[in-house]
Each structure stands twice: as structure tokens, then as C-alpha cells.
Amino acid sequence: MEGTTKPLALQGVKVIELGTLIAGPYAAALLAQFGAEVIKIESPDGGDPLRSWRKLHDGTSLWWYSQSRNKKSVTLSLKEPKAQQIVRELVADADIVIENFRPGTLEKWGLGWDDLSRINPSLIMVRVSGYGQTGPYRERPGFAAIAESMGGLRNLVGYPDRPPVRVGVSIGDTLASLYGVIGALLALHHLKVNGGEGQFIDVALYEAVFGVMESLIPEYSGFDHIRQRTGSSLPGIVPSNTYLCRDGLYVIIAGNADGLYRRLMAAIDRPDLGEDPRLARNDGRTLHTELIDDAISAWTIRHDLDDVLATLETAGVPSGRVYDAADIHADPHYRARAMIEAHALPDGSVIDFPGIVPKLSATPGGTRWLGPKLGEHTQEILATLGIDAAAFDALKAQGIV
């Protein structure tokens, strides 16, 4: 794959990934996109289950190809003592280990923090789990769906007269991944710049969700206020909602700053509401949410979506269509920002994948190759530990690799 020709921000950083599916592997994926050498340890028996999730191309998930780009796949049966020893040898000169096993699992294999930090005192270890490494729930199995519920998100998603719904992606996992990457980079800075020591980062899925819940707890603590589901509106911020247009499509309008609100009211021919002193500030507008939303809806329903968007863009009011995959794929802004990348699969088929985020001006990330075949790099990596071809064949015959 063609990648960036500019320097890579994490070039020279070695990461060992122990884990499956999303939270741990996505954190490692972000590091790999910016130049880290990520060695992903997979079971010889089928590898990461993500390889077979969602839409498959010749038996391999397109999600796998995307999330595992730039990684090296090494197969090791971690329940085997010889495989555990190979991991220890790999960790000896690694910078970061990322894992998302249930707490206590790696300790059973002699691969926990105490074991690995003795081998490599400078090691940084990102530990992602449902409930964290401590506390009464630490040993419970945890998935994003449960974390989103416990973290407070699910209770806010949907309409008040219907059951809670989920966001269409595993947001609890990806939030935990982002916190894991932040923690790893903070620890790496402390180690390299401040002369500190290695450390582990304890990321709980539910805490990653809870961490973005804004004023949920202060409002409960101060006012006994429990936020509930409010459908498409943003509670306490007015106007910010979804409105139906004449052609049956929806527009999102966020006119919630005071100046924006006045411009919005002028654009929809309701200057009376724009100049109403009761509605000059957000705290006043929240008392008259229905009045304002009804006025906006009465305007949008008389116009097609494209006309609504054109009018609001001219007025300088933030607005947008509800994008689906086809809208994203066709949008010129995505293309101009290199957020859609075309790459060839092993059979030569060209598929579009998401671009790299964030955009660094001097050391941008890039896609050097898509997700590897299972065990594609096992012999290459083990050779760096002095395991020659004969020894590798013996390990393979024993089911260790």
C-alpha cells in the first residue's frame, strides 16, 4: 500500500497488542497509523474474531482490513508456557503493551503488569476492561453495550416514551480506545521527557463513557435532576433539533448561540421571535422550546432540504443533512480532506476505507498496508528473537504458533 512519504510521529515505538475485537485493538490501530510497529498476538485457532465480523470479502471482514492496517500478525497460543515466554522476550524491548483481557487473565499466564514490568521497567501497559482492574465488579465480563448503560449514555438515547436505544457503533469501545491512547502518550512523554518510569494505564469501558457525560452528575448532585431521553433535541440547549423538510428528508439545525438564534429567526422570516426579549438568552429559550421548534418546523416543512441548507448557509447558521454511507462516499469535502482512501485487497479488488484522524501537518499518519493475513509475520518476528526456521517448524508442530 502507498503510505505517507513524510516522517511518522511514532516511528521507532514498538507496541505489543494482546487482545481481540475493538477496545484494545483499536487503540493499537491508532498508534500503528502514526508509525508505531504494532505486533498483534493472535490465537493460531482462527485469530481475532473481528476477522469474521460484518461484511466479508473472500472470508475476511472489511472491518478487519480497516482496523488492523499497518499491524503485524503473530500467532501464539497464549495458554502454552512456551508462547508465554516468547511474549516476555518480545516485551523486553517493547515500549507499550495493550491488552483487553478480563482482569486476572494475564496474571494467570505470568504476563500481568508485575511480571512484565520486572522484565522491562520502562514498559507502558494499557489495560482495557469492562470495569477496571480494581473494584467489586472487576472480574465481571464487560462489553461496550453494558458500559454504555452503566456509564449513563443509554438512558439518554431515544425518545422518552420508548425503550433506550443504542448508538449504531460500539462507542463505548472506541471511547476507551481513545482514552487508552491518550494515557499511553502521556506515559510515554513522562518517561522520555521527565525521566519518569514505566507505568500501566487502567481504562474501564464504563468510565470512558461516563467521562463524556458532561454535567450529568453535577446537575443531579446540585439539583436532584436526572436527565432523561429527549429524542432528537439537545436538552437545555435551544434551538438544537432535527426538523422535517418538504421532500421527506431531515435537517439538523443548531442555532443555540444567542447571535445564531437571531440570524436563524431572520432566515425563517420570524424576526418577531428573534427580537423577543424573553428569548434573547438560552436560559429564556429553554422555557419556550416548543414555541421555537414549532416555528422552525413550520418553515422547514415548506421547503426542500437543499433549499433549507442553502438559506441557512447564507445566514451563517450551522445546519446539515443526516448523512448515510452513500452521502459520505459522494461528499467532496470528505475527498478534499483525504477521508476516503482507496486500497487494493489481496485479490486486487479496490475498496474505499476511512482516512486517518487526526491530521498532523508535519508527521501525518498513513495506511502502509491493510490488515494482515493470520500469522503473516510470525516467522519474521520470531526470527528477531533468534528462533530459526527449524525451531519455528517445531513450535508450529506443537501448536504453539
Image (cartoon, helix red, strand yellow):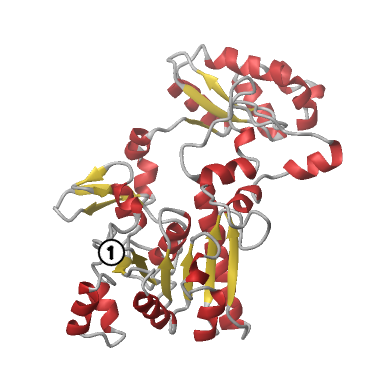
From the image, tell me which residue sits under label 1. 44
Counting from the top left corner in percent of width and height, residue 353 is at 31, 49
Which quadrant is the N terminus positioned in?
bottom left
Q: Is mark 1 on a helix, strand or loop?
A: loop
Say whether residue 60 is left or right of residue 196.
Answer: left
The answer to whether residue 43 is above or below residue 316 is below
Image side of residue 345 versus residue 113, left or right: left
**Front residue (pair 304, 54):** 54
Residue at 44 percent of width and 66 percent of height: 31
Above or below — where is 287 with respect to 13? Answer: above
Q: Which of 114 and 335 is in front in this view?
A: 114
Q: Can residue 120 be seen in this view?
A: no
Q: Quadrant of the C terminus?
A: bottom left
Quarter of the image holding residue 129?
A: bottom right
Residue 316 lies, in percent from the top left, at: 57, 34
- Describe residue 286's horizontal placement relative to residue 111 as left or right: right
Examine the rendered structure and indicate whether residue 6 appears above or below residue 210: below
For this rendering, which residue is in front, 335 or 216?
216
Q: In which quarter of the image is residue 67?
A: bottom left
Disc 1 crowd rating (10 Å Cα; few below 14, some 14-19, many 20+) is: some
Residue at the farthest bottom position? 386
x, y (%) of residue 343? 24, 54
Give the residue type that dot 1 points to. Answer: Pro
